[in-house]
Image (cartoon, rainbow, N blue to C red):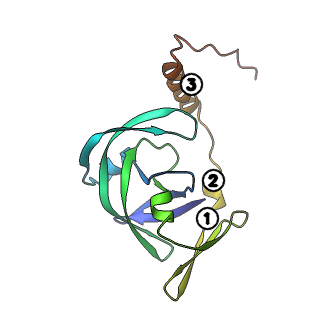
């Protein structure tokens, strides 16, 4: 589910992802906002595409505002294409019981006596895949599997 939010007054696109084992921030966003990055040993991240990428560092205590909710979490930097922030299990695990309606793209979260409803934006989930992104994914797969070249059939238009 994708939601708009802000970090330091900059609008960001947030993916709430129960399949993500960590929280991630776009490398580009980290550079744009000059967010402090603490050095760590390198680590590997398995992307949803099945491609493994290497990362290094952590952004601690990043404050995100979204739909009346403020989130302060640690994030691993990663090259992200159509998303600025991924909120994964480290954040979701702090919320306790919640009611999620994936069809309606809503999450109801109880914070003390208050119920907060996060509403996903269906327009943010509809993204076109560029030829550049597809080529990059294929090149990464070629490296991963040790292929010398990737040959595609001619494109029929």
- Judged left or right of residue 154, residue 147 is left
Question: Callout 2: few (<14), some (14-19), or many (20+) C-alpha neighbours within 10 Å?
Answer: some
Measured as percent of width and height from the top left, residue 85 is found at 45, 54
Question: x, y (%) of residue 2?
Answer: 57, 59
**Looking at this rendering, what residue extends furthest in the right direction?**
156
In the drawing, what numbered circle is on residue 120?
1
Q: Position of residue 10 (x, y in %)?
A: 39, 61
Residue 12 visible, this orientation: no
Let me know if residue 86 appears in the view.
Answer: yes
CA gap, disc 3 to disc 2? 22 Å
Mark 1 to mark 3: distance in Å? 30 Å
Q: Nearer the viewer, mark 3 or mark 2?
A: 3
Please say if 8 is above or below 134. below
Query: Which element is circle 1 on?
Result: loop
**From what the image shows, is residue 37 above or below residue 108?**
above
The residue at which mark 2 appears reads as 125
Within-10-Å neighbours for mark 1: few <14, some 14–19, many 20+: many
Q: Nearer the viewer, residue 18 or 34?
A: 18
Secondary structure under badge 2? helix
How far from the left and from the top, in percent, is residue 143? 48, 20
Of the image marks 3 and 2, the number of the one nearer the N terminus: 2
Q: Disc 3 designates what residue? A: 138
Instruction: Say which label, 2 or 1, has the lower sequence index.
Output: 1
Residue 63, numbered circle:
none
């Amino acid at each position: 589910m994708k939601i708009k939010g802000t970090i330091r007054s900059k609008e960001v696109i947030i993916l709430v992802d129960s399949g993500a084992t960590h929280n991630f921030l776009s490398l580009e966003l980290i550079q744009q906002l000059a967010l402090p990055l603490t050095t760590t040993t390198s680590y590997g991240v398995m992307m949803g595409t099945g491609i493994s990428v290497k990362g290094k560092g952590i952004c601690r205590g990043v404050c995100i505002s979204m739909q009346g909710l403020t989130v302060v979490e640690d994030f691993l930097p990663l090259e992200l294409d159509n998303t600025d922030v991924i909120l994964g299990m480290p954040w979701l695990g702090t919320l306790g019981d919640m009611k999620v309606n994936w069809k309606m793209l809503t999450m109801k979260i109880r914070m003390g006596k208050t119920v907060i409803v996060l509403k996903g934006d269906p327009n943010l989930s509809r993204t076109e895949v560029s030829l550049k992104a597809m080529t990059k994914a294929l090149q990464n797969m070629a490296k991963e599997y040790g292929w010398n070249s990737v040959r595609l059939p001619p494109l029929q238009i």
